Amino acid sequence: MKLDSMYQDVILDHYKHPHGRGLRDGDAEVHHVNPTCGDEITLRVRLAGTTIEDVSYEGQGCSISQASASVLNELLVGKEIDEARRVQEVFLELMQSKGKLEPDDAMEEVLEDAVAFAGVSKYPARVKCALLSWMAWKDATAQALSQGGTTSTQEGTA
Amino acid sequence: MKLDSMYQDVILDHYKHPHGRGLRDGDAEVHHVNPTCGDEITLRVRLAGTTIEDVSYEGQGCSISQASASVLNELLVGKEIDEARRVQEVFLELMQSKGKLEPDDAMEEVLEDAVAFAGVSKYPARVKCALLSWMAWKDATAQALSQGGTTSTQEGTA
Amino acid sequence: MTHLPGLLDTEAIRKDFPLLDRTVHDGKKLVYLDNAATSQKPRQVLDALNDYYEKSNANVHRGVHTLAEEATALYEGARDRVAAFVNAPSRDEVVFTKNASESLNLVANMLGWADEPYRVDRDTEIVITEMEHHSNIVPWQLLAQRTGAKLKWFGLTDEGRLDLSRIDEVITERTKVVSFVLVSNILGTVNPVETIVRRAQEVGALVVIDASQAAPHMPLDVQALGADFVAFTGHKMCAPTGIGVLWGRQELLEDLPPFLGGGEMIETVTMSSSTYAPAPHKFEAGTPPIAQAVGLGAAVDYLSAIGMDRIEAHEHALVQYAVDRLCQVPDLRIIGPVTAEDRGAAISFTLGDIHPHDVGQVLDEQGIAVRVGHHCARPVCLRYGIPATTRASFYLYSTPADVDALVDGLEHVRNFFG
Amino acid sequence: MTHLPGLLDTEAIRKDFPLLDRTVHDGKKLVYLDNAATSQKPRQVLDALNDYYEKSNANVHRGVHTLAEEATALYEGARDRVAAFVNAPSRDEVVFTKNASESLNLVANMLGWADEPYRVDRDTEIVITEMEHHSNIVPWQLLAQRTGAKLKWFGLTDEGRLDLSRIDEVITERTKVVSFVLVSNILGTVNPVETIVRRAQEVGALVVIDASQAAPHMPLDVQALGADFVAFTGHKMCAPTGIGVLWGRQELLEDLPPFLGGGEMIETVTMSSSTYAPAPHKFEAGTPPIAQAVGLGAAVDYLSAIGMDRIEAHEHALVQYAVDRLCQVPDLRIIGPVTAEDRGAAISFTLGDIHPHDVGQVLDEQGIAVRVGHHCARPVCLRYGIPATTRASFYLYSTPADVDALVDGLEHVRNFFG
Ligand SMILES: Cc1ncc(COP(=O)(O)O)c(C=O)c1O
Ligand SMILES: Cc1ncc(COP(=O)(O)O)c(C=O)c1O
């Protein structure tokens, strides 16, 4: 069944048992909205030097956007910012591939559980769901770095 | 040839040799425009009691609108206002008939040369041309009556 | 096959709609339940479009040649048909726009630029409701921001109806305009027009009715409504995209200033000033949606031939059936009236804590097309504390079998995420 | 048959246009010379419309179901095609409107509501020209009236060209916006973009170009033009009625306020305030002209496959031929450049003192469709002291035989009224 390519077990698992959900202390906070469906996420990043110490989040959304935030937390916490950025870029590439990119071993090594989202890239309306938390993370990290640590809220678009 | 039903000789005659053209003294003056084609007419009415003493006019327009003003002058000058109004109404009826009204003897008696416009009523875009001077006359007469004789200018639509 | 009293002969009707034969996802029969978003188009309307383009296409109003006369007659003929369809006192009260949103923006802008007694300014108030489509919220927010007028609104009851208990405090002597939806696109609620119009008239406020979800589904009589303006949109009523309607009372259309300027809407133009054509042309700047108006005329003919009262009865029976069956689905909560009374053919619901996106996706895989999200009525979602809904909406070609497919589909959704 | 260098294979092309087979007035072959008013539509565009309605019709942007995804892909795909057609740096710079008139009104309204540095107000000036279409005059008159800004314009030379001799006095430090037509729909004149843009940029004024008569007929490159906004309309370029385009520079579209409010153009809505989606969606309130955009995409594909440079060459050859032949008709006076250089495919003329209405009527009887009147450019008629003109205008399917028919027809007109 084609639907299984989107709703991989890994995704449903993350959806039902999200990692690191809830808001904790952070250096920057952002609030992102997906205007086409109303999905929302509030996300905080806490840095320790150039290491990502925590990504905490709360939000409303479908299984794809929720699972994606959970995978993000699992993947990025503990990583160096530069490395995390590379992961984010590879994930973005995969999501924008319209189902035409078959993840290879190298990609799988970078993305770990996140390769499960390959199937979602075939559904344009859902790609934004998968990217919501990642765009929020990118934005929050940039803010945390530029503001040297002050917390702020802003509206943005995934 | 179908065109001949519009461009009757009577009409072409009036077009080439218009009656009563030119502006003379009047009790009221109006300026009407046909917005779809830019035809314009300035028309004055002079009354003597309830008699139409003169209808003078000047304007730009096609053969139909020019001939129609000439016919109007010929038909209405010298008539009682009430009678002239009846002529105007019959002419309006004929022009709005979409070519479906075959003028009978009674109508011909009222309209004289103006029955020649029966063919024009088949051409919706030209009906307004034929009516331009008649609408202007109706308007000017109403003004002449209500203002008891002061001259005025106004924009209207045919 | 379930038989309900009042149903139309959908077997015959469905033959008119080529798209309904489509299959999706490897041969699954399409079950189209997204009619509140847009309707499908009957062959008769597509034929009218093709005929227009293949035989009579020309620009309107300004030509003496045969094609231009034919195109003008077709375009203005569509205006006659639409005027008759909504029982307008005069054809000149029917303004063609590009969609209902433009119609509503047109009114808001006219009132912002109008002279007294219509002018909306800082001392005046605008009243809308919490169940409006964004297209009947944002134009008034913009008008309020730009003029300094105050925007007020009626809230909603827990049952999904307008809360009119404080109507005299909401609509006051300062109210210049009251704009509300006749049938909600998210809740399905049919609103009590008379109560609102009576109060608005008491204080001399203009009444604008958003009939986008009414015109396709029930007899619409602008005179009986008692409103000053009524807006609706072609694509939801079997007509092409790209055409909307604003009906307005003649003297208002005469008194109010134009909105868009350009060709077609003028009487005479000089470089320094212009005068404007009489309504409706005053409000139709530029080449109008000619073919789309012709298509709307054909749609109105099609709907009238079946009968708007019969379409209303059909949908009523179907909604009754759907509400009953949906109420039996475990964890399903209808957002909006849980009854078929005073209710249109759109039913929104939540399904446990399965997100509507996921509901819609799994239904789609089974060929069932529903809409998910806030349906351009986000304040309603906020009001009921939900992020979004799943919405199934019916039309004249919908059947009890469609409802059954939906209910089965939802069972599948529950299992999938169970 | 007359053969001219540079002509397209019109025999093949005409087969694509079903309407061109039509006859009028008891079997007379149609000679369609009213292309500046609107163009005919090729089979390929009609097929795209039918395909859309019969297979993929749904509302766009908000659905997860298959039809909604297909419709969205088709609609947004049309944006990609149009962006490529005008060489836009980004697809997000292409806003779909209902026609060129709405595009121009959109810009005028944005500038009226904008913050500095764009805001047009009583201390600023707007510059247009005397050869504008009413759709590029009236929006600016309305803006001037509503903001107190001063409206100025370039006059015309006796040859039908812009009089730019006092350009530095017309466009000054107070000028906020300069809006002008690239190709005149009445005179046929192609205007010197570079000179005007250079001066506008010197004083920091925004430049709006009305390319309604250019986009259908020549390669259009918004980057090469150097303008800030470019407007054009679908129905004149083989596309359906009901669709127009506004191209705008990205940072301007980002900075400027929305115009119409409603569904599709929002980011998030509460009852008291809203935020807006990024451009182009910010400017596309309500259900867009979906099928019409798809049709425009197909039209752009059709034109591109033939090649805009080849279409331009074809029309240039034809205009050269037409000007030469028309100049030989006794009493005929061309209103506009009497040459094919810097000249589009519309030729206006007067014929002695025979009124254009009469000319058009007698031509129509012979199957020849031309436009008569002021062509929504009344100031041009005033400038040249004429009530109206007869206008013949060509397109990619026009032939030397069409020109010959026109010339013969005019001879007949002269005899008829002789
Ligand atoms: C030069 C020019 N500008 C603007 C327009 C307006 O286009 P539309 O009527 O499609 O809005 C036209 C055509 O009518 C035109 O020729
Ligand atoms: C109640 C209501 N009002 C207004 C609209 C706006 O219609 P359109 O998008 O055609 O402008 C819609 C549909 O989207 C609607 O359901």
Image (spheres, coloured by chain):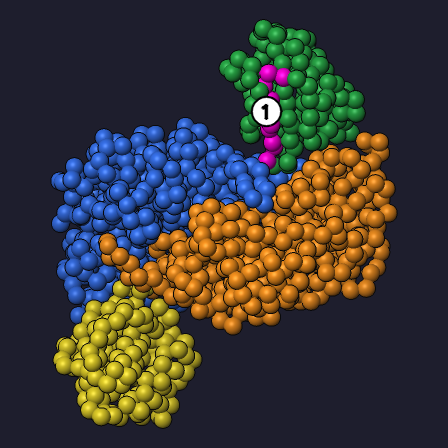
Chain colours: A green, B yellow, C orange, D blue
Judging from the image, mark 1 belongs to the subunit labelled A
* Residue at image location 38% in from the left, 70% down from the top: B124
Residue bearing mark 1 = A30
Q: Depth check: give the residue in front, D332 or D141.
A: D141
Q: Is residue C251 visible?
A: yes
Q: Can residue D59 be found in the magenta stretch?
A: no
| Quadrant (top left, top right, bottom left, bottom right) of the C terminus of chain D | bottom left
**Observer-nearest of A93 and D48:** A93
Q: What amino acid is labelled 1 in the image?
A: Val
Q: Position of residue D180 (x, y in %)?
A: 27, 43
Identify the residue shown where x is 68% and y is 51%.
Answer: C156
Q: Is residue D96 left or right of residue C352?
A: left
Q: Quadrant of residue D343?
A: top left
Relative image position of residue D121 (x, y in whole percent) = 31, 44
Q: Position of residue D6 (x, y in %)?
A: 29, 38
Stretch in magenta: A26-35
Q: Secondary structure at mark 1?
A: strand
Q: Main secondary structure of the magenta part?
A: strand
